Image (spheres, coloured by chain):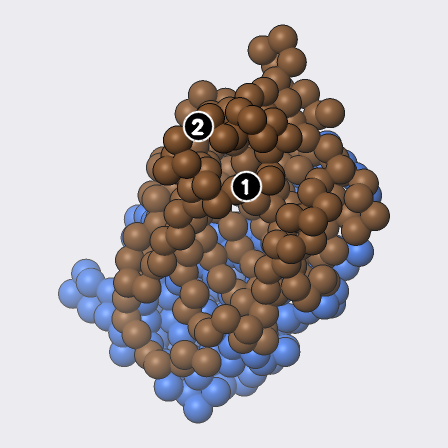
Chain colours: A brown, B blue
Amino acid sequence: MNTTPTSSAATFFDLKSGLITGDGVEESVKLLSQLEGLFHDEAAWRKMDPETVVYRVRFWRPVPDGTKGGLFWGATYLEPGKVGDEYFMTHGHFHAIRDRAEYYATVSGTGALLLMNEGGQTWSQTMTVGTVHYIPGGIAHRVVNTGNEPLVFLASWPSDAGHDYASIRTAGFGKRILERDGMPCLI
Amino acid sequence: MNTTPTSSAATFFDLKSGLITGDGVEESVKLLSQLEGLFHDEAAWRKMDPETVVYRVRFWRPVPDGTKGGLFWGATYLEPGKVGDEYFMTHGHFHAIRDRAEYYATVSGTGALLLMNEGGQTWSQTMTVGTVHYIPGGIAHRVVNTGNEPLVFLASWPSDAGHDYASIRTAGFGKRILERDGMPCLI
């Protein structure tokens, strides 16, 4: 645990853009090629440039992964776009330690937060500037950009939560957000 | 644990003012009379209006206090002002479960985050718009408004962290932020 006295904050966030900067901030980029099997229209997915950036995550881990009682914080920048009639979205995950919760807070853009319990029951919450979403333990979470600009949201989660992506790769979410007559629909 | 499907976010935050609103948001107001013994100039404290609002905290507890793995979130509005030569500040606390961390993120105003380990060693971090502060487990934290406008910051912390105010009431912090020649100094 880092208890070294330090007189400067290690990260900064821009309230308009959501951009996180500072020492120790890591960035992870997710390309379309890394999201194989996620979108229902596989033919449309194959026709697109595999190098297309779908989202970036910038995060700060001030303590090692797995630290009990610690917290991480980050920002996700989800690009606008579609694969066929399905909006760009994050992979989505449960936490490896199931009872660990998470907060999302929307900084810019418009979208939907897909939530799913372990029984596969799926629902959504609308994300617009200023909405704050509590994701309880045991609930898988995925974000969908239903707008025309990047969807940016902040997140805070326990440093021992871990990620379970495999359950989502295997079974997906119970519902998808698809475009129907120009409107996003939960189907 | 609340896993009831709900289609709306329960809270909202204003990125400019930091104001948290929505169902289930609670507010706690701290008056000068409730901060007896905190400021070093007790005579100056006695001369002031005891009903003076020093700070308000608005917070959202989507799960019961003490829930393992859960998170709370809130915003603090710390008024500008002084008691003698000492700036308005929050009471400050350790977490009852010592290894629990916390994040502070500054939305508006200027101030100092006072941090202290259990040995009494005290240091400070400057708070300005956009600074993000990680408070590791085992570290007491207090915020001081050194500016002329309200200091507003967001916080996120584990729902089982609890608060230990008594240690601070008894022993205080190792250092104070006092005005010296018009400037805030850590003394």
Q: Residue A63 at x, y = what percent? A: 45, 73
Q: Residue A133 at x, y = what percent? A: 62, 43
Residue drawn at x 64%, y 55% as measured from the top left: A166
Q: Is residue B103 above or below residue A171?
A: below
Q: Nearer the viewer, residue A113 or B127?
A: A113
Q: Is residue A115 left or right of residue B91?
A: right
Q: Which residue is mark 2?
A: A48
Question: Can residue B93 be seen from the camera position used here?
Answer: no
Q: Few, some or many C-alpha atoms within 10 Å of disc 2 (few <14, some 14-19, many ≥20)?
A: few
Instruction: Determine the CA span between mark 1 and mark 2.
Output: 12 Å
Q: Is residue B7 above or below residue B59?
A: above
Residue B183 found in image quarter:
bottom left
Q: Which residue is mark 1?
A: A36
Residue B181 found in image quarter:
bottom left
Can you name the residue that lies furthest to the top here? A181
Q: Chain letter of disc 2?
A: A
Q: Nearer the viewer, residue B38 or B84?
A: B38
